[in-house]
Image: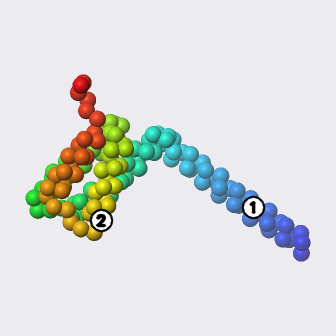
């Protein structure tokens, strides 16, 4: 009986270690695929941007055309892809939007102000 249990535990332990190894390999592959630490930060920023865009499109005020929202967010998404965005400023802007409009619909001036802050988070290619 004792021998049966030790064999069972050994198989369970080997199975567990195999699952952990496969998970680590898959995680390492995904981590390298997104570009390491910096790539992961930009990937997470894009995910946060997508969530805010969905919320804004659902709760868009009448004074803001849908095309304007889509165009602006696409520009920010491209800047994230090119790593030409201030991540701290972007996160602060997205967090402020989520905090302020989690349960309420923003007004047209509030959305325009939010758009201005989003645009400020993008680095300019022009020399200063």
The Cα atoms of the two marked residues, 1 and 2, are separated by 45 Å
- On the image, the x and y values in percent for residue 122 come to 28, 39
Residue that numbered label 2 is attached to: 102
* Quadrant including the C terminus: top left
Q: Where 108 sits versus 74, above or below? A: below
- Observer-side mark, 1 or 2, equals 2
Q: Which mark is residue 105?
A: none
Residue ID at (79%, 66%):
9
Residue placed farthest to the top in the image? 127
The residue wearing badge 1 is 13
Secondary element under disc 1, as helix, strand or loop, is helix
Place of residue 117 in the rendered image (x, y in percent of width and height, measured from the top left): 24, 46
Say what secondary structure mark 2 lies in.
loop
Can residue 49 be seen by looking at this rendering?
no
Q: Residue at x 41, y 50 (%)?
A: 44
Mark closest to the chain's N terminus, 1 or 2: 1
User: Would you say 12 lies left or right of 96 here?
Assistant: right
Residue 73: x percent and y percent? Answer: 25, 49
Residue that lies at the very extreme toward the left in this rendered image: 63
Describe residue 10's horizontal placement relative to residue 104 as left or right: right
Q: Residue at x 26, y 63 (%)?
A: 101
Which colour style is shown?
A: rainbow
Q: Which residue appears at 65% of the width and 58% of the height?
A: 19
Which of the two residues, 86 or 55, is positioned nearer the viewer here?
A: 86
**Label 1 neighbour load within 10 Å: few <14, some 14-19, many 20+:** few
Hey, which quadrant is residue 119 in on the image? top left
| Crowdedness near tag 2: few (<14), some (14–19) or many (≥20) residues, C-alpha within 10 Å | few
């Amino acid at each position: 009986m004792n021998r049966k249990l030790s064999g069972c535990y050994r198989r369970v332990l080997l199975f567990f270690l195999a699952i952990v190894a496969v998970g680590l390999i898959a995680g390492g592959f995904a981590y390298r695929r997104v570009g390491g630490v910096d790539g992961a930060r930009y990937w997470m920023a894009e995910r946060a941007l997508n969530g805010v865009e969905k919320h804004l499109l659902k709760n868009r005020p009448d004074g803001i055309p849908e095309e304007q929202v889509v165009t602006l967010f696409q520009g920010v998404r491209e800047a994230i892809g090119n790593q030409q965005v201030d991540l701290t400023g972007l996160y602060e802007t997205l967090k402020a939007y989520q905090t302020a409009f989690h349960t309420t619909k923003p007004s047209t001036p509030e959305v325009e102000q939010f758009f201005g802050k989003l645009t400020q988070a993008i680095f300019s290619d022009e020399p200063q």
